[in-house]
């Protein structure tokens, strides 16, 4: 059984990890952020954008109105715009999750307009795992560009090593 507070806790971790990696990316030359890396969604910034877009779509599936599109028009938000949009979105998501029955089933439609129904805890777990997967890709791309990204492992969050 999943405790109700655990969902918000997982989303707080995901915000912490995304924010920590985005904060680091601000010291990376713009050319590295926008460089085509043939990985994930093209490069570092595009992968950050992808995580944000997915978080936004999943939140809108839980708390209508439903987001009418997945991606923003090119070039999409930069790191400064993500700061203004993403963390506020994740705070709303955390607030929503804190009051949910983790086993409540949510009906939604995917990007192909196909119907699905899943318990809240499975959706939140997916959102967090999706972000973790792509943050790992961002860390690998940063290393390929010669940078050493910070660790965003969950255990560091749990241990309070949240510098």
Image: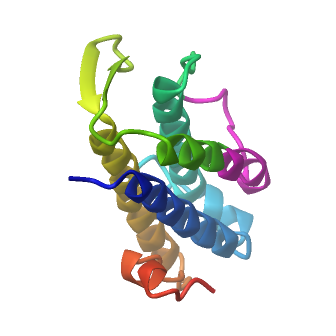
Boundaries of the magenta span = 71-88
Judge whether 97 appears above or below 38 on screen: above
> In this rendering, is residue 147 above or below 47?
below
The answer to whether residue 60 is above or below residue 132 is above
Q: Residue at x 25, y 19 (%)?
A: 116
Q: How is this picture coloured?
A: rainbow
Tell me the quarter of the picture where residue 52 sits: top right
Residue 128 placed where, x, y %? 39, 54
Numbered marks: total: 0
Judge left or right: residue 119 versus residue 64: left
Q: Answer with left or right where residue 147 lies relative to residue 108.
A: right
Q: Quadrant of residue 147?
A: bottom right
Residue at 27%, 42% in the rendered image: 122
Q: Can residue 136 be seen in this snapshot? A: yes
Q: Residue at x 34, y 14 (%)?
A: 112
Residue 83 included in the magenta stretch of the image: yes
Identify which residue, 155 or 99, lies in the foreground: 99
- Residue 130 at what x, y percent from top left? 36, 51
Residue 119 position by quadrant: top left
Query: Which quarter of the rendered picture does the C terminus lie within?
Result: bottom right
The answer to whether residue 49 is seen in the rendering is no
Residue at 53%, 61% in the rendered image: 12
User: Residue 145 placed where, x, y %?
Assistant: 53, 75
For residue 133: magenta? Answer: no
């Amino acid at each position: 059984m999943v405790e109700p507070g655990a969902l918000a806790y997982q989303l707080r971790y995901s915000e912490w990890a995304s924010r920590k990696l985005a904060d680091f990316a601000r010291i990376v030359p713009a050319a590295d952020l926008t460089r085509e890396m043939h990985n994930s969604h093209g490069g570092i910034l595009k992968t950050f954008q992808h995580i944000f877009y997915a978080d936004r779509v999943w939140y809108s599936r839980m708390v209508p109105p439903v987001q009418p599109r997945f991606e923003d028009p090119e070039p999409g938000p930069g790191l400064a715009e993500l700061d203004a949009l993403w963390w506020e979105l994740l705070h709303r998501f955390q607030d929503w999750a804190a009051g949910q029955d983790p086993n409540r089933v949510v009906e939604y439609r995917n990007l192909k307009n196909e119907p699905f129904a899943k318990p809240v805890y499975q959706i939140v777990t997916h959102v967090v795992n999706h972000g973790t997967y792509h943050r790992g890709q961002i860390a690998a791309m940063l290393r390929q560009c010669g940078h050493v990204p910070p660790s965003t492992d969950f255990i560091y969050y749990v241990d309070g090593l949240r510098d």
